[in-house]
Image (cartoon, rainbow, N blue to C red):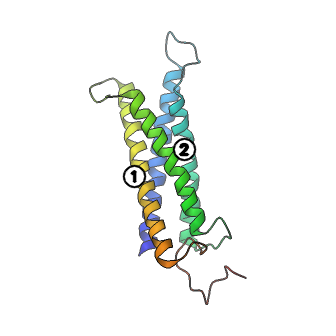
Amino acid sequence: MLSTIRLTLYAVLAVFAFFTFALAAARIHYTTHLVGHSGDFYEPVVAEILATALLTMGWSIFVILVIYKRLEIPRVGTFIAEVVGLGVLFLFWIVGAGIASTAWGDISLCLLSACKVLASLLAFTWLSWIVVLALLITSLMFAIANKAWNEPLHGRWDPRVTHYYQ
């Protein structure tokens, strides 16, 4: 049951990260092609959000494969590695969302297409952070309750059958 919830959350996170990536790419394209500006103008926070989205998509796909196929990969396939990875993503998402929220202020009244991209980018950035937070809490609770820090992160192991510690 827990592995199904985690798989679903990671799939949602991958989709949100993809949308965030696409919106950030659109924003970078818009700002580097503004009429009357040199090609040097771009917002560093958008580049940070784009990089975070790429990292998140890669991490989500990796963890989905590990959970779904029950892969047992030493060191990177453990709950401690998942918690560390989610902790890093948590920091990246909260920093990007916080800086973007501060820099862009209240964009809800703007009706321009550029503002709609910014509003959508901001929304998906915060949604991605919420999903990362939910995954981090879920994995922490499972690892603490089962003392499973060095166990395979798929969470469906039987110590008598596992080939993890050979």
Q: Is residue 22 left or right of residue 117?
A: right
Left or right: where 81 falls relative to 110: right
Q: Is residue 66 above or below residue 18?
A: below
Q: Amino acid at mark 1?
A: Ile
Counting every numbered tag in the picture gives 2
Q: Which of these two is toward me, 164 or 22?
A: 164
Q: Quadrant of the N terminus?
A: bottom left
Residue extending farthest to the right is: 166
Q: Which residue is mark 1?
A: 130
Q: Is residue 160 above or below residue 74?
A: below
Which quarter of the rendering shows the C terminus? bottom right
Residue 12 occupies quadrant: bottom left
| Residue in view at x 54 percent, y 70 percent | 67
Left or right of residue 84: residue 35: left
Q: Position of residue 83 (x, y in %)?
A: 54, 62
For image coordinates 56% across by 86% down, the residue present is 158
Kind of residue indicated by mark 2: Thr
Residue nearer the viewer, 68 or 91: 91
Q: Secondary structure at mark 2?
A: helix
Rendered image: mark on residue 52: 2
Report crowding for label 1: few under 14, some 14 to 19, many 20 or more residues within 10 A (C-alpha): some
Q: Residue at x 57, y 72 (%)?
A: 149
Q: Between residues 103 and 23, which one lies in front from this camera angle?
A: 103
Please provide percent x and percent y for residue 62.
59, 60
